[in-house]
Amino acid sequence: MDQGVDCEYQVVHDDDGTTLVHLSTFGSQQRISHRKSSQSLQVDKGIAATLVDILSDAFGMPASDLDDVLKEAYRKNPDRLRAIISNDEASRDVIAMAHRRSQVERFRRLLLDSGYFDSEAAKMKDCSTKSAAREKVWQNFFQDNPWIFGVSLSGQLLTSWDKQKLEKVVAGASIANVGKRVDALLTTSGRIKSMVFAEIKTHRTPLLGPEYRSGCWAPSSELAGGIAQAQCTVHEAIREIGDRLARKSADGDDIPGEYTYLLRPRSYLVVGNLNSLVNDSGGHNKNKFRSFELFRRDLVQPEVLTFDELLARAEWIVESGDSGSI
């Protein structure tokens, strides 16, 4: 005959605020007397942890069973479990790094999986051309992952000038002037901020055109056009804005002492993929790479970065974070 007893629990708080689990047993159902508590036990956090270890050792609970227990606890009270995790500093680091790792995987997939990239480009709305849709994929990706630009483009920490959107019009359109829109408008961090411009093309943009002379390859028209676009955007912004731009409050007033400076601002062009300089057998085409590298090294502005170089920097950030090193 089953001689078990009922046991109920209640979460209570001690006078000093300590959380306790109060366990009460009510004896077997065969008792003649009315149902009443016969024994009670209070468990605090330390005792609970010890009890879990004892039960795990006693029953040899494998990790998969523990996962099931956690999943069931999350199903019953997801808000409580989220609160516990979010209040743990170490868990916040783990969550942030896990998110970055997933975004690096997406970065890699966009770069290497043509079908996936095309499907993402097909989702882009309000784009007049396929080229614009492809650029929009990357603009959205970098806007969603400001840490990639923030620590990858420059020795200084860069943040978006507008927290809502990377892309900005930096020189207005008028009857006498064409508007200038920059794909990413950034600022350096620090007490005094400087403006930084970035143009974003696609990884499919060719870096080089035809061979101009034996062993010498000219930059592609798309690369030259992107450079000209970046240079004109910076020039028009300086001409229209001047040396510095005042920050505005929500009501349109200047914020005292809050300026972003445009003193020979830095600019970047993110374009192409160095894999295009690799021959069919997988070896480096030395002449192509030399032509491209010498060309970009002699540029004053913008600094040219390829998408695979940006991915490599993002991978390093995640890997160094996983290992705890800098």
Image (cartoon, grey):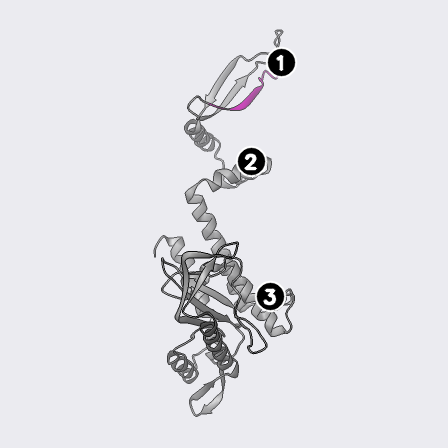
Label of residue 172 in the image? none
Instruction: Locate residue 49, reporting x and y percent.
Output: 43, 31
Within 10 Å of the Cα at label 3, are there few (<14), some (14-19), or many (20+) other Cα atoms?
Answer: some
Could you say which is closer to the camera, residue 278 or residue 65?
A: 278
Specify whether residue 108 is in view: yes
Q: Tell me which amino acid carries mark 1.
A: Gln
Could you say which is closer to the camera, residue 116 or residue 234?
A: 234
Label of residue 73 in the image? 2
Q: Tell me which amino acid carries mark 2.
A: Ala
In the picture, residue 302 is in which quadrant?
bottom left
Badge nearest the viewer, 3 or 1: 3
Counting the numbered discs, the total is 3
Q: Which residues are magenta?
A: 1-13
Residues under labels 3 and 1: Cα distance?
63 Å
Q: Which residue is mark 1?
A: 29
Q: Is residue 215 magenta?
A: no
Within 10 Å of the Cα at label 2, are there few (<14), some (14-19), or many (20+) other Cα atoms?
Answer: few
Q: Tell me which amino acid carries mark 3.
A: Tyr
Local SS, label 2: helix
**Residue ranking furthest to the top:** 33
Residues under labels 3 and 2: Cα distance?
36 Å
Q: Which residue is mark 3?
A: 116
Badge nearest the viewer, 2 or 1: 2
For the N terminus, the image quarter is top right
- Image check: 50 left or right of 171? left
